[in-house]
Image (cartoon, rainbow, N blue to C red):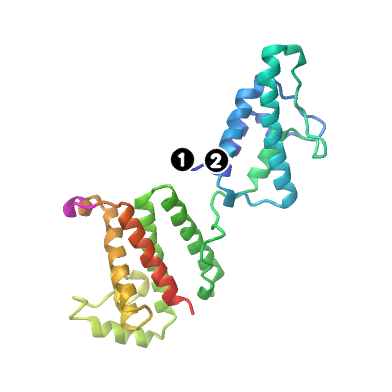
């Protein structure tokens, strides 16, 4: 099922009800039976928005819910009365107790202030990072991974898990004295590494982050094993490699990559 986000529904509302974008109180256009198909479209799309994206103040959330339920009630009434006696069909203007605006406008106004991406409430906070900007960015990635798993988007979950592991290990290595990192790296050259990695940590690849991190005991040996698998699966994003090895991203690769990510997070959490 396609993922629906607030901005998409706002765009649909602007297309179906252009006046809602600039409507002012007291100048609301009545909604009638003829509007039912367009209203049903809005209700259907709004119902597919993930709950964690409905980031609204309590009053506005109440207006949003009231507007949707009122529209649904009127559509049901119109479907009955229009067939029996069109003369008794009622029009929908505003909702008593709420701002004197069309419910369509209230829905649009609420969704216009919602994000299209937001970390789920169950996503790890990554407070140990000590960098709010980086923590929020990675939490957003973690939330996207959760969503990808739920939707069966195995490649997205696999590849993004590897990217987050890479970002976390880079951060962890940057917290160590440069001399320690250089010494650990030197020990691996000629064995694990065929040649020295680039001078800047930013230019390393996931393989190098993993091996130096385990050498410095930033992550455990078991975590390193899981992370190496995640690295291999992440490389399946390249069509040539996937074809050469006869592999593809699937539920197994996604779950393995996510498990590796969880191990890394656990090892880095004080």
Q: Is residue 202 above or below residue 180?
A: above
For label 1, the crowd category at 10 Å Cα-Cα, with few meaning under 14, some 14 to 19 and many 20 or more, is few
Location of mark 1 (residue): 2
Residues at discs 1 and 2 in contact (Cβ within 8 Å): yes
- Left or right: 169 in relation to 252: right
State the residue in front, 85 or 270.
Answer: 85
- Name the residue at 35% across, 83% down: 217
Q: Is residue 91 above or below residue 236?
A: above
Q: Is 132 placed above or below 56 here?
A: below
Q: What kind of element bears circle 1? A: loop
Q: CA distance from mark 1 to mark 2?
A: 9 Å
Nearer-N-terminus badge (1/2): 1
Using the image, tell me which numbered label, if any, was put on residue 48. Answer: 2
Q: What residue is at 77 percent from the left and 28 percent from the top?
A: 93
Residue under the image location 47 percent in, 60 percent down: 142
Residue 131 on image: x %, y %: 54, 72
**Highlighted range, magenta:** 243-247
Residue 189 in percent (x, y) is at: 22, 81
Asked whether 186 or 222 is in front, the reply is 222
Q: Quadrant of residue 108?
A: top right
In the picture, measured across the screen, residue 150 lies left or right of residue 132, that is left
The percent position of residue 230, horizontal first and vertical second, equals: 31, 63
> How would you classify the magenta stretch by its main secondary structure?
helix
Give above or below for 3 relative to 37: below
As for residue 41 lying within the magenta part, the answer is: no
Lateral position of residue 129 relative to residue 193, left or right:
right
Q: Residue at x 75, y 22 (%)?
A: 91
Does residue 16 show up?
Answer: no
Neighbours of disc 2 within 10 Å: few (<14), some (14-19), many (20+): some
């Amino acid at each position: 099922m396609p993922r629906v986000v607030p901005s998409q529904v706002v765009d649909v509302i602007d297309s179906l009800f252009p006046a809602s974008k600039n409507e002012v109180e007291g100048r609301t256009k009545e909604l009638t039976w003829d509007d039912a198909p367009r209203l049903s479209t809005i209700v259907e799309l709004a119902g597919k928005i993930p709950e964690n994206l409905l980031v609204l103040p309590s009053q506005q959330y109440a207006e949003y819910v009231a507007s949707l339920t009122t529209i649904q009630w009127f559509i049901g009434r119109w479907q009955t009365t229009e067939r029996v006696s069109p003369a008794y069909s009622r029009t929908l203007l505003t909702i008593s107790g709420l701002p004197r605006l069309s419910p369509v406008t209230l829905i649009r106004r609420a969704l216009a202030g919602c994000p299209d991406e937001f970390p789920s409430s169950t996503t790890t906070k990554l407070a140990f990072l000590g960098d709010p900007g980086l923590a929020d960015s990675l939490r957003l990635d973690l939330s996207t991974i959760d969503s990808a798993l739920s939707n069966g988007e195995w490649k997205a979950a696999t590849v993004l898990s590897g990217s987050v592991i890479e970002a976390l290990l880079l951060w962890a290595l940057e917290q160590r004295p440069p001399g320690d990192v250089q010494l650990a790296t030197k020990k691996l050259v000629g064995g694990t590494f065929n040649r020295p990695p680039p001078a800047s940590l930013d230019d390393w690849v996931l393989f190098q982050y993993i091996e130096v991190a385990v050498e410095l005991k930033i992550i455990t040996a078991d975590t390193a094993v899981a992370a190496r698998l995640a690295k291999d699966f992440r490389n399946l994003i390249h069509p040539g490699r996937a074809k050469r090895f006869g592999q593809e991203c699937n539920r197994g690769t996604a779950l393995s990559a996510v498990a590796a990510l969880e191990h890394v997070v656990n090892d880095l959490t004080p």
